[in-house]
Image: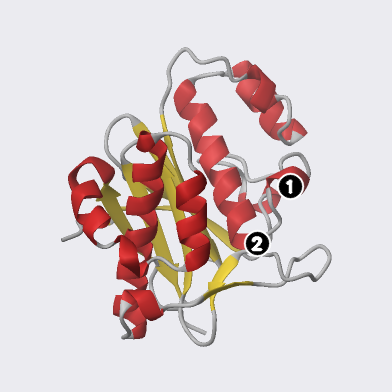
Amino acid sequence: MSHAPLHLWLLDVATSTEAATTLAGVLDEAEQRRLAAISTAEMADRYLTAHVALRSVLAGYVGVEPQRLVFARDKCPGCGGDHGRPILAGAGPQFSLTHSGDAVLIAVADRPVGVDVERARPGRDRSGVISRLHPMEREMLRSAPTEELFLDCWTRKEAYLKATGIGMAGGLASHYTGMAGAPEEALPSGWSFVNVEVPEGYWASAAIAGAGGTERVLPRSFSLG
């Protein structure tokens, strides 16, 4: 069975916050409450811009106005409860949203997908996070603890856990997602990992259900307004 391609959309918060503010009315009540609870203006701008962007992108796929999109939760893969990964209520594409610093990244596909972007912080102590990863990942990062290698490993891990709905709490140590060049036989069966080209100072990865191997993808840049 052939699949539609993975679509990736990249937005810069700094150049879109003003437009996002004028479009804040597209957010639903739950999003508005989360936005109001954010304590710093910087984080609020990121949340607002990211979620307005998500609605704008998905509206183009579904063919409705952004404010008419209704979000729900998929079944939890662990307990079956309605608190799994975010999905669109009714028919629509699969998606994933991530943001860090001024980078917002959105993935859209016809099958489960997850994406993660992280801003590099050279010199930051990562030992506490590394100690919580899969034993094979811990060993590799201890032998070559560069920021680039850590972010490659971490973004793949978070993208996979978002795509599956497993979540960070239960999946950091129990699922091996490795890093670029990891042996395919050691990776989760039925999943592909993608290195995403993002601006200098950031690192991003996507995980998508289905075979296909590791590849590098250049996302499409866009802005609001």
**In this image, 193 relative to 21: left or right?**
right
Which residue position holds label 1? Answer: 171
Q: Amino acid at mark 1?
A: Gly
Q: Is residue 212 visible?
A: no
Q: Earlier in the sequence, mark 1 or mark 2?
A: 2
How many numbered marks appear?
2
Question: Residue 88: horizontal and vertical position, in percent?
Answer: 51, 76
* Residue 106 seen from this side: yes
> Can you tell which mark lies on residue 164?
2
Q: Quadrant of residue 13?
A: top left
Task: Mark 1: give few (<14), some (14-19) or many (20+) Cα within 10 Å.
Answer: some
Residues at discs 1 and 2 in contact (Cβ within 8 Å): yes
Which residue extends farthest right?
Answer: 79
Give the SS element for disc 2.
helix
Residue 87 disc label: none
Q: Position of residue 2 (x, y in %)?
A: 46, 82
**Which element carries disc 1, helix, strand or loop?**
helix
At horizontal 45% and vertical 59% (from top left) the residue drawn is: 32
Position of residue 91 relative to residue 135, above or below, is below
User: Is 19 drawn above or below residue 28 in the view shown?
Assistant: above
Specify whether 82 is left or right of 214.
right
Task: Give coordinates of residue 44: x percent, y percent.
Answer: 40, 43
How far apart are labels 1 and 2 at the CA level?
Answer: 10 Å
Amino acid on which disc 2 is placed: Thr
Q: Residue at x 26, y 54 (%)?
A: 21
Q: Residue at x 77, y 47 (%)?
A: 170
Residue 139 versus residue 33: which sits nearer the camera? 33
